[in-house]
Image (spheres, rainbow, N blue to C red):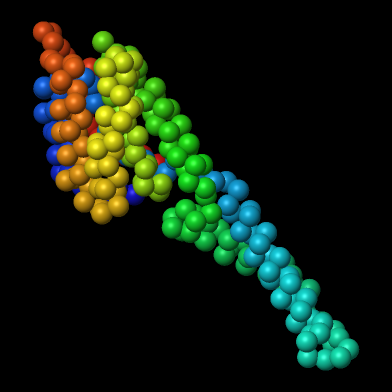
Amino acid sequence: MANLSQQELDRLAQAITEAEKTTSGEMRLIIVKNSTRASYLFPMLWLALSLLSLLVLWQERHAFWLHESPIVLHEPWWLVPALLGGSGALAYGLSQIPWLKRLFIPKAEMAAAVWTRAELEFYREGLNHTDGATGILLFLSLFEHQAVVLGDKAIAQKLKPETWNEVIGHIVRGAKTKQWVEHLEKAIQLCGQHLRQHFPPQVGDKNELPNHVIVKD
């Protein structure tokens, strides 16, 4: 998870405040632990490890490769349940390792999950209810090392999706290098620069959304 101190979170909130002074756009920065649930990974690993354990047990019991006729061994009754339980514990532990999870989950599935979560957070945080439809979400999902920038209707009409590629690049780079604040600050500043070209400050502008950073699971 993003291990940001309160001081660093305040610094990012101040960066949003400063960027919003130059535009009528309303920014929100949300960082989540993961967007991809992959509920199938644990049972898949458990099944594979259980089958492997039972296969090894079967080979040990019959010992075909050592004797012309199989030697049947008698293990205690609790051995099979113990193997299954141990396989389950190991499978659960493996299923929690981020880099291993990324090996099993298709990139397309992760990208779709991140996009879906970003859309959910966009509406959950009320970014679609700003005056002038100028809400914009900077969204980072840590497990996938992916980011999304979502703008409301007015922003989407003026700025093409590729406009945000450099902003996304800074967000992702911060996640990969752990230089969170520096790269997130650059992403916020760059986002403000894009917005002020088409959405300069208006008379009577008010801060419609809180500027603090949202960090959640």
Tell whether 85 sits left or right of 211: right
Front residue (pair 71, 107): 107
Front residue (pair 47, 189): 189
Rendered residue at 66%/62% (across/down): 48
- How many marks the image carries: the answer is 0
Residue lying farthest to the bottom in this orientation? 67
Rendered residue at 41%/47% (across/down): 144
Residue 181 falls in image quadrant: top left
Residue 188, image x and y in percent? 19, 34
Rendered residue at 18%/16% (across/down): 199
Residue lying farthest to the right in this orientation? 69
Q: Is residue 153 visible?
A: yes
Q: Is residue 85 visible?
A: no
Residue 195, image x and y in percent? 19, 23
Rendered residue at 19%/26% (across/down): 194
Tell whether 172 sits left or right of 199: right
The correct choice, above or below, for 66 with respect to 54 in the image is below
Residue lying farthest to the top in this orientation? 203
Tell whether 89 sits left or right of 62: left
Residue 209 falls in image quadrant: top left
Residue 17, image x and y in percent? 14, 28
Give the position of the C terminus as an image quadrant: top left
Residue 62, image x and y in percent? 82, 82
